[in-house]
Amino acid sequence: MNLSITLRDRRTYKEYAGLFMIKTGACIVVALFLASLGYICYHGAGTLSPSFLSSFPEKMMEEGGILPCIIGTAILSVGAMAVALPLGIACAVWLNEYAKEGPLKKLITLAVANLAGVPSIVFGLFGLAFFVTVCDLGVSAIAGILTLAVLTLPIVINTVRETLSQIPNSWRESSLALGASKTQTVLRTVLPAALPGILTGAILGLARAAGETSAIMFTAAVVSTTNLPNSPFAAVMSLPYHIYVLATTGMNPDKAVPIQCATALVLLMTVFALNLMAFYIRQKSSKRPA
């Protein structure tokens, strides 16, 4: 009896200790996030204004706004998704609906998983070596778009595959039983049902592309410009690279920090809005009756 109580007490203590460590870790993460957000808001909120969002950098980026950074980030992110989304959907559909179990499917699945874990700086070096040099695209928006498309491809593939795997097989069987072909079943039954997941993957890919610095610093980004890009072969400014430049060019901190923080605040709000949209779509689709 006493031994049983002792063992139960030990388990209880271990549970409390584990729970305490988990809560402490969570509190530390939240505190760090709030501290970072508070610092950015404190230093950047005063600089953030309509003119800051709609004007060009001036006086060696110590004044002016971030309009070309916003436009450049939008071009790179949307362009990357325009390339990665159809390729990712096609790959996910083939892996989930057509590919038979075997070495080839395992190899592609392993390649996608490994690609998702590759550091973004490696994608940047690949883009520099292949798109900029071999393909002779130069440092340009199109080179950055293709590099970001490769970077975001695993996100799209994994998200779409997860969605496709959650669609009941009875839907496919019912479609085939009614005389539809495999392709018709995929196009008219499976993909429409997977649309929320596809949208989620696209939005998450957009958010990832918008926040990338290393992948574009060698392929697409320019320090400063006085014109908006008028060609896919023109270099562009971007929000994350602009923050990096402001932090490393040796500017007067009194002038650089407010612009850095205001730019970071715009980037954070953009990424947060995209992630919130993806979360909303996923939550809404999960409540939909099967």
Image: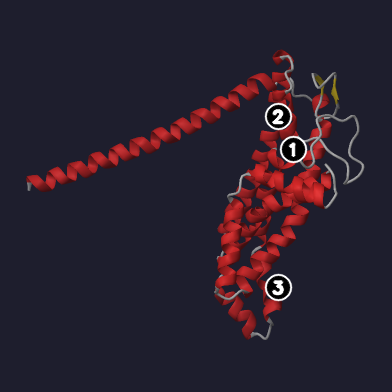
Place of residue 80 in the rendered image (x, y in percent of width and height, measured from the top left): 76, 50
Q: Give the side of residue 177 with respect to residue 183, left or right.
A: left
Q: For numbered disc 3, what is the local secondary structure?
A: helix
How far apart marks 2 and 1 lie (CA) works out to 10 Å
Residue at 63 percent of width and 61 percent of height: 160
Q: Nearer the viewer, residue 230 or 71?
A: 230
Mark 1: amino acid: Met
Labelled disc at residue 116: none
Place of residue 47 in the rendered image (x, y in percent of width and height, measured from the top left): 74, 20
How far apart marks 1 and 3 lie (CA) works out to 41 Å
Labelled disc at residue 244: 2
Q: For numbered disc 1, what is the local secondary structure?
A: helix
The reply to whether dot 2 and dot 1 touch (C-beta < 8 Å) is: yes
Mark 2: amino acid: Tyr
Q: What residue is pinned by disc 3?
A: 188
Q: Is residue 46 visible?
A: no
Mark earlier in primary sequence (3, 2): 3
